[in-house]
Amino acid sequence: MATSPGPLDKVRNLPSLTGLRWATAMLIFGHHLMAVEYFGGTPGVIWGNLFEAGKTGVTLFFILSGFVLAWGYKPQQTARSFWWHRIARIYPLHLVGVGLALIAAATLVPEIRADGTAPVVANVFLVNGWVPDWWQAGNPASWSLVCEAFFYLTFPFLIRPLARASNRALGVVVVASLVVAALAPQIASMSPIPMSAASTPLLRMPEFVIGVSLALLMKKSAWQPVRLIVAVPLAVAGYALSEAPTLPGTDIHPGLAATVGFYALLVASLANADARANSTFLARPLWQELGRVSFAFYLVHLLVIASVSSAWPDGHPQLPWRQAVPLALAAFGIALGLAWAMHKLIEIPAQRWLLRYDRSRATVRSASAPGVHLAANR
């Protein structure tokens, strides 16, 4: 086995995490093919069994976001600079996604039309997820960006005490995050304020926090993750356990805690492989390019899936597999082509243009370190 090229806190490039973003996007794509019912009959049942848990890809995204932001954390970066970098990273494509969603809603996919303008305006400003009834207003896929926006808002205040915390305190934070993840559905059901365990940013925060905490522990060489030969089967188990029932008579969901914990182990193990110069197949050039396109793909894929299926009654084709597979491949190809164009023509130029207005040159250089800023968010 290759040895570490140096202290882990000096390692900047984590290419396997960029590749993991694409694999995660594929889980979500498969889940939405299931939700729109491209496959009918027995193939539909099989597809559903495989991809019902695909929605947990968002959990993996949240963990990845926390992990990579903490891994690339620079104490000298101001909160203002950090927030500007995050705006530059996600907001241009978010606005494009909302625009495309409004076009789809007015033409091929009327079922995603919002009830009034207020939910759409809330989506533009990434606050609609705080109102459960508005969680998929505007671009239905961008509800997760509402959570990410909240994570970004809190990160400068969260990272400083966590970076100074003892190893034991960070371990307590990890355990507490897992407990809250399991309790989130119960908290939502008991809250006097309307909340959703699936979309309320505060209740998705533990997934982000556990990513932050594990990255800090690894950078301090205070914790060694399990090897990938163990982490991968555990992640598969976590995927399946997300569909486990709640505790009898409660909304407490231990399976969710297992999902979050095992996914976090996978992220840490992949990062450890990269840091020790033993990168995985996810670090290969094709996976890197797809990982970089994954954010744009995520924003448009559901719009494309629903638009392609709009010719069938209620937008649910329910086709035999011989017809469903070509239809699914067509949706995939259109979504990938559109995402690639958005990435090259909008995301990269807009990000570069906006970052010119960050007056902290050192921050710009640190945020542009290879493989770190690209893996931070989808």
Image (cartoon, helix red, strand yellow):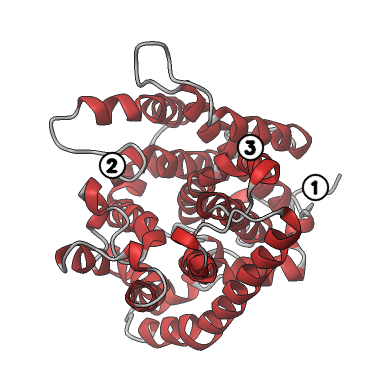
The amino acid beneath tag 2 is Leu
Mark 2, other Cα within 10 Å: few <14 / some 14–19 / many ≥20? some
The amino acid beneath tag 3 is Asn
Give the residue at x 53% y 24%.
244
Q: Which one is in front in this view, the residue at disc 2 or the one at disc 1? A: 2
Q: Disc 3 to disc 1, how far (Cα)? A: 40 Å
Which of disc 1 and disc 2 is earlier in sequence? 1
Residue bearing mark 3:
49
Q: Position of residue 219 (x, y in %)?
A: 56, 45
Q: Does residue 191 appear in this view?
A: yes
Q: Position of residue 18 (x, y in %)?
A: 62, 61
The amino acid beneath tag 1 is Thr
Q: Which one is in front in this view, the residue at disc 2 or the one at disc 3? A: 3
Residue bearing mark 1:
3
Extreme residue in the top direction: 248
Residue bearing mark 2:
202
Q: Which one is in front in this view, the residue at disc 3 or the one at disc 1? A: 3
Callout 1: SS: loop
